[in-house]
Amino acid sequence: MAGFGEAIAYGAVTIINAISIEKGAALGADLWTKARVQLNKEAGIVKGRILSDPREDTTLMKESVSRVLKHFQSDKEYGAYVETESNIPIAKGLKSSSVAANAIILATLAAFGRQLNDVDIIGLGVDASVSAKTTITGAFDDACASFFGNVVITDNLKRRILKRYEVKTDFLILFHVPDQKSYTFTSNVKRMKIIAPYVEVAFREAFSGNYWTALTLNGILYAVALGYEPKIAMDALSAGAKASGLSGKGPATAAIVPKRDVNKIIDAWRQYGGTIIKAKINRKKARILRKK
């Protein structure tokens, strides 16, 4: 057997960063990563290329495919070639690793002709992300929001989904993305742990359904802790954003925005340089696109 599979997974934005309290929450965004996996007979060898950023490390894609092959005890028989393409910038706090892992796991399953339940698929991706050192907590919250869409609240340590909310309001998501990158392995975990009691307050807000309040509280806390400019979020709030704060470990700042206020926030952010990305709230599941 030498099958082929292609899959897509969607982006996410932080509501609660789980690094400080090991519980998190995230919101689906309709940014995307597509993965294509071609199995071959080069047993245990996984090669790949990130088409949208060829200079980036491919350890995560290799770990993701290997996790599937090992799960089905087939790593001594098969290898694979993997390609991904994405409109999600890497190492900006926009969940590029969690999204890629979901897409690659799904594409590998399609190529292999096997099925797993949703939580097991997410779990394999989280394991791959931990092995590849693209996450500190496993990013179970990010992976779930990427896979399921809408708002997902999780216990990352126990890998349990605690609550899910369907977002009914048709807000847009704006991201201010600075030019610099921020890789997880360089993150200052000690400073993030200091703010744990205050992040707990934000988490309780999210769990109670006040997830926009939680996003803002969490985002400003982490921005201050990690040395990013919280004024970017404050300017978005002043210009009409429903919520705004640092996404993940940064450097990107996210804003949840009524359509009528999009241009005002874009204008407010122009002074900071970088790139502004516009997205919609995602309500779709990650899925297989084709297999043969």
Image: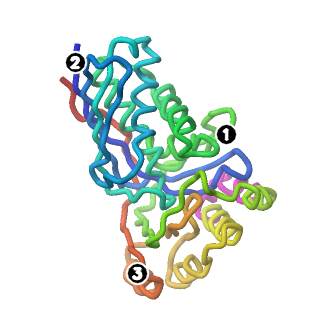
Q: Name the residue under label 3.
A: 266
Quarter of the image with the N terminus is top left
Q: Nearer the viewer, mark 2 or mark 3?
A: 2
As measured in the structure, the alpha-carbon distance from the residue carrying label 3 to the one carrying label 1 is 34 Å
Q: Disc 3 vs disc 1: Cβ atoms closer than 8 Å?
A: no
Tell me if residue 233 comes above or below residue 71 in the rendering: below
* Residue 215 placement, left or right of 224: left
Q: Mark 2 points at which residue?
A: 2
Quadrant location of residue 163? Answer: top right
Residue 70 in view here: yes
As measured in the structure, the alpha-carbon distance from the residue carrying label 2 to the one carrying label 1 is 38 Å
Query: What secondary structure predominates along the stretch shown in magenta?
Result: helix
Residue 111, position in %: x, y?
27, 23
Residue 176 in view here: no
Q: Which of marks 3 and 1 is nearer the N terminus?
A: 1
* Residue 200 placement, left or right of 89: right
Residue 108 is covered by the magenta coloring: no
Residue 201 is covered by the magenta coloring: yes
Magenta-tinted stretch: 200-213
